[in-house]
Amino acid sequence: MIISKIVTLNFIYFNLHAEEVINSNYIKDDKSGIYGDRLQISTIDRIAEEIDKDNFASKNIVFDFKFINACQPNLNRTVINIKNKGYKILLIDISKKLCEELAFDSIENSNNTLQGDIFTKFYLFENAHNNFTNIEIKPADIFYEEFKSTIKKYINPHSLPHSSSFVYLTSYVDMKKFMSYEKELLLFSIYKLAIKIKTKWQNEIEYGPILICQSMNSAFIVSILSTFLKLDILIFDKIGPINKLYNRLDNTISDKRKYIIVSDLVCLGTEVKIVKSLIQFIGGNCLGNVSLIKTETLKNTHIIKENATIAIFSIKRANNKELNYDIFTDLESL
């Protein structure tokens, strides 16, 4: 399984660290989470097999090396084999040191861009006038467009009121179906969420905060996150862990631990507020909440920082019409 492959009109994108995380944790089973930074031959071989299998119409390939700091010896042979099959290859966010170790530094292209010790662009071909060198590559934008076009297939008309938040929604995001049919993109999204969590709470992660969720959808997400981040989990279902019944909440929430609430989609945040209140009532420390998708119903300047949801995709003013997603109250006509 290749989780990060994104096919655009002009190139095929692969995130090598994301593929290494999958390879290390689910194929090689070394349980390094997202903390491994050494690219293995078996990882690049899986990508090469994917390229051979699909025989892409576009012959331009982008390999994203962000978070990769080392490689197994002779890994460059696989990359050169791909190149020899007629593909133009661009490496982004690769260290100068790694380029030298892989013996790529002998390839000269005036469009290669070095910033400090990192090549933001390194072309594995010498034709500086090739059209590929004129294409702007922004991984965040590539992922955003891929996720947006995919999630649109799972947004359905919805006429019932949102029972927990007392508003009307024009549409319903079928997260269960998305998670069932888009496994590769789902895993890539959870990987990206894990990176965001690690970045946001880098000082707290080493002390082992607990990932907590309150639905079956988010239970799946949190189980993958726990592997990626090497953290414990606590699963709630209707204000009670699904695997055991407790008479007292303080049997499950500890005032000595910190918690991160995980959701699949945060609309107005009512369920998140309930869980956060329970954690704080017992004396636990809620670091914040994260989600795959969130709706932005306020301007960023009006959101209290500690209440902001960290997500990998936002339904917001810039895209809600395209997604056919609106929120209303009875104070105006629907």
Image (spheres, rainbow, N blue to C red):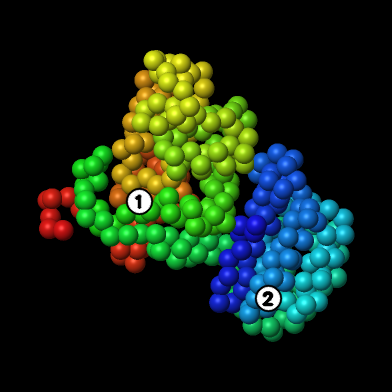
Q: Where on the picture, by quarter, is residue 269?
A: top left
Q: Which residue: 46% across, 16% down?
A: 251
Q: Is residue 213 above or below residue 100?
A: above
User: Residue 112, position in %: x, y?
Assistant: 72, 71
Where residue 146 appears, as percent x and y from the top left, is 50, 64
User: Could you tell me which residue is drawn at 67 percent across and 54 percent down?
Assistant: 19
Could you say whether the residue bearing mark 2 is in a helix, strand or loop?
loop
Left or right: 308, with 12 as reference point: left
Q: Which residue is mark 2?
A: 55
Q: Amino acid at mark 2?
A: Asn
Q: What percent of the width, then of the height, locates residue 255?
A: 47, 17
Quarter placement of the C terminus: bottom left
Is 14 situated left or right of 247 in this image? Answer: right
Name the residue that disc number 1 marks: 295
Q: Who is closer to the viewer here, 266 or 162?
A: 162
Question: Residue drawn 26% across and 39% down?
Answer: 164
Q: Quadrant of residue 236?
A: top left
The image quarter in which residue 152 lies: bottom left
Tell me the crowding category of disc 1: few under 14, some 14 to 19, or many 20 or more residues within 10 angstroms, Cα based. Answer: many
Residue 279 pos. (x, y %): 41, 24
Looking at the picture, tell me which residue is in the foreground, 226 or 80. Answer: 226
Which of marks 1 and 2 precedes in the sequence?
2
Residue 306 visible in the snapshot? no
Given this view, does label 2 or label 1 mark the residue nearer the observer?
Answer: 2
User: From what the image shows, is residue 97 above or below residue 60?
Assistant: above
Q: Secondary structure at mark 1?
A: strand
Image quadrant where one finds the N terminus = bottom right
Residue 272: mark:
none
Is residue 11 something one can see in this rendering?
yes
Q: Whole-Å distance between the Cαs marked 2 and 1?
A: 38 Å
Please rate how many residues cluster around mark 2, counting C-alpha atoms within 10 Å: few if below 14, some from 14 to 19, many from 20.
few
